[in-house]
Image (spheres, rainbow, N blue to C red):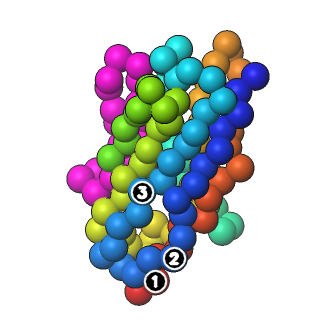
Amino acid sequence: QVQLVESGGGLVQAGGSLKLSCAASRSIDTFNHMAWYRQAPGKQRDLVATSTSGGTTDYAESVKGRFTISRDNAKNTVYLQMNSLKPDDTAVYYCYVDYNREDYWGQGTQVTVSS
């Protein structure tokens, strides 16, 4: 079992920055694949960024160059640094991990970007 707790969402003006955190209930060293997803109202949940235990990261085209995913293994936490935010980034952001062939999601944190 894995519990994931996101934090750091909020309201920000376009062009601003936010840093999301996702704290895991166990060591993330063993998590080969961690990710951030987002879901805007009336839309499907989309992949935003991924991180592997080997240090590989990948991003959706819409956020490349603006968002950065990172891990702090000592704190069992994965982060999403979001810069140059746009109104289109408004969504609920979810932390995700697959562990022992099971999917785990956090409860989500709301990010709202005003124009």
Q: Which of 3/38 is in front?
A: 3
Report the residue at 52% width, 30% height from top. Answer: 76
Report the residue at 66% width, 30% height from top. Answer: 25
Amino acid under disc 3 = Lys
Amino acid under disc 1 = Ser
Mark positioned earlier in the residue sequence (1 or 2): 2
Does 53 lie within the magenta span?
yes
Q: Secondary structure at mark 3?
A: strand
Q: Secondary structure at mark 1?
A: strand
Q: Please identify the quarter of the rendering in which residue 58 is found.
A: top left
**Residue 54 rendering spot, x and y as whole percentages:** 35, 17
Q: Residue furthest front?
A: 74
Amino acid under disc 2 = Leu
C-alpha distance separating marks 1 and 2 = 7 Å
C-alpha distance separating marks 2 and 3 = 12 Å
Does 72 lie within the magenta span?
no
Report the residue at 40% width, 81% height from top. Answer: 13
Q: Secondary structure at mark 2?
A: strand
Give the labeled residue for mark 2.
Answer: 11
Q: Which residues are magenta?
A: 44-67
For label 2, count other residues whose C-alpha is less than 10 Å away and answer few (under 14), some (14-19) or many (20+). Answer: few
Mark positioned earlier in the residue sequence (1 or 3): 3
For label 1, count other residues whose C-alpha is less than 10 Å away and answer few (under 14), some (14-19) or many (20+). Answer: some
Give the labeled residue for mark 1.
Answer: 114
Q: Residue furthest left?
A: 65
Give the labeled residue for mark 3.
Answer: 19
Q: Please identify the quarter of the rendering in which residue 62 is found.
A: bottom left
Asked if residue 40 is positioned above or below residue 51 in the image, the reply reads below
**Residue 73 rendering spot, x and y as whole percentages:** 44, 26
Mark positioned earlier in the residue sequence (2 or 3): 2
Tag 1 and tag 2, C-beta contact below 8 Å: yes
